[in-house]
Image (tube, rainbow, N blue to C red):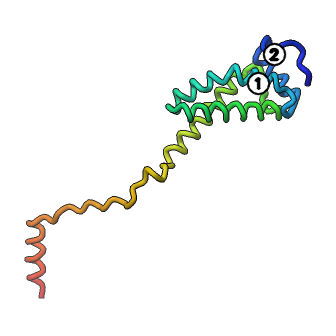
Amino acid sequence: MASSGPVIELGDAELARRITAAGDGEAPAEEAELCRRYGNRLLYFGRHRLGSDDDARDLAQDALLLTLEKLRNGQVREPERIGAFILGVARNLSRSYLSGRSRLRPMDELPEEPPAPEIPPPDPLVRARVVTCVEALS
């Protein structure tokens, strides 16, 4: 789809509509502009939610790719709310990242051998009573 006019002057909703109308990757200027507008916002959101620059970059990339895929496939019902849509995608992805992080530990963080169970020392009074009882048996 040929762009008419500079995409930088378009609103977010119009960018989203053009990406949807163009289909699969046929609106590269519009896609690039949408990513430019939301990239830093997603990085900030990711750093706040995930606490790591690397995780924030992964989150921003995944959120933008998923958003573009949904736009290209016509799955965004309200293009005038594209900002909220992108934030919702990022929020859901961050929850997924955090739940996965809590279940997985890198192999180098695991102990070489499992810790030995703590066995409390025997109580001398209990031991003496058990000995007395055993001696009383026939």
Q: Residue 80 versus residue 104: which sits nearer the camera?
A: 104
Q: Residue furthest bottom?
A: 138
Residue in the picture at 79% in, 27% down: 77
Question: Residue 123: x percent and y percent?
Answer: 13, 64
Q: Residue 111 versus residue 94: which sits nearer the camera?
A: 111
Q: In the image, is residue 123 above or below residue 87?
A: below
How far apart, in angstroms, are the residues tagged by discs 2 and 1?
9 Å
Question: Residue 28: x percent and y percent?
Answer: 82, 26
- Compared across the picture, whether 118 is left or right of 69 comes to left
Disc with the residue nearer the chain's start (2 vs 1): 2
Which amino acid type is shown beneath numbered disc 1? Ala
Q: In the image, is residue 103 above or below residue 68?
A: below
Q: Residue 81 versus residue 102: which sits nearer the camera?
A: 102
Please name the residue that numbered disc 2 is placed on: 7
Please name the residue that numbered disc 1 is placed on: 32
Residue in the picture at 72% in, 34% down: 65
